[in-house]
Image (cartoon, rainbow, N blue to C red):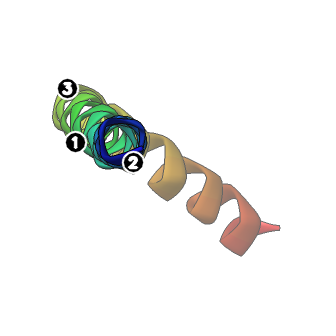
Amino acid sequence: MTRLINLYIRAKNALDNQKGQGMAEYGLILVLVAVFVYGAFQLLGQNIDATVKDIAGKIKSS
């Protein structure tokens, strides 16, 4: 009976550890998305700024 309880406890601990691993993977994905967005803004930032200023100038003129 003791072996069965120990087996159950080990299986439960293994499943609990996988939940933490999943959270770590989500965190890594979030970091990768943030780095990608930052890089995209760095590359396209001046184009976006120019477009917004152009639109604002056209709105102001009308």
Report the residue marked by disc 2.
Answer: 5
Q: How far across and down, in percent of the image, does residue 30 sit?
A: 33, 42
Q: Tally the numbered discs.
A: 3
Q: Secondary structure at mark 1?
A: helix
Kindly identify the amino acid type of the residue bearing the numbered disc 3. Answer: Leu
Q: Position of residue 27 (x, y in %)?
A: 28, 46
Quarter of the figure with the C terminus: bottom right
Relative placement, left or right, of 33 versus 60 is left
Q: Residues within 10 Å of mark 1 (few under 14, many from 20)?
A: few
Residue 43's tag is 3
Q: Which tag is nearer the camera, tag 2 or tag 1?
A: 2
The CA span between labels 3 and 2 is 58 Å
Q: Quadrant of residue 58?
A: bottom right
Of the numbered discs 1 and 3, the one sitting upstream in the chain is: 1
Of the numbered discs 3 and 2, the one sitting upstream in the chain is: 2
- At 74% from the left and 65% from the top, the residue drawn is 59
Q: Earlier in the sequence, mark 2 or mark 1?
A: 2
The residue lying at 27 percent from left, 38 percent from top is: 21
Question: Disc 2 marks which amino acid?
Answer: Ile
Tag 3 near tag 2, CB within 8 Å: no
Dot 2 alpha-carbon crowd within 10 angstroms: few under 14, some 14 to 19, many 20 or more: few
| Image spot of residue 38 (x, y percent) | 21, 41
Report which residue position mark 1 lands on.
Answer: 31
| Label number found at residue 58 | none
Q: Is residue 55 left or right of residue 52?
A: right
The residue type indicated by label 1 comes to Val
- Tag 1 near tag 3, CB within 8 Å: no
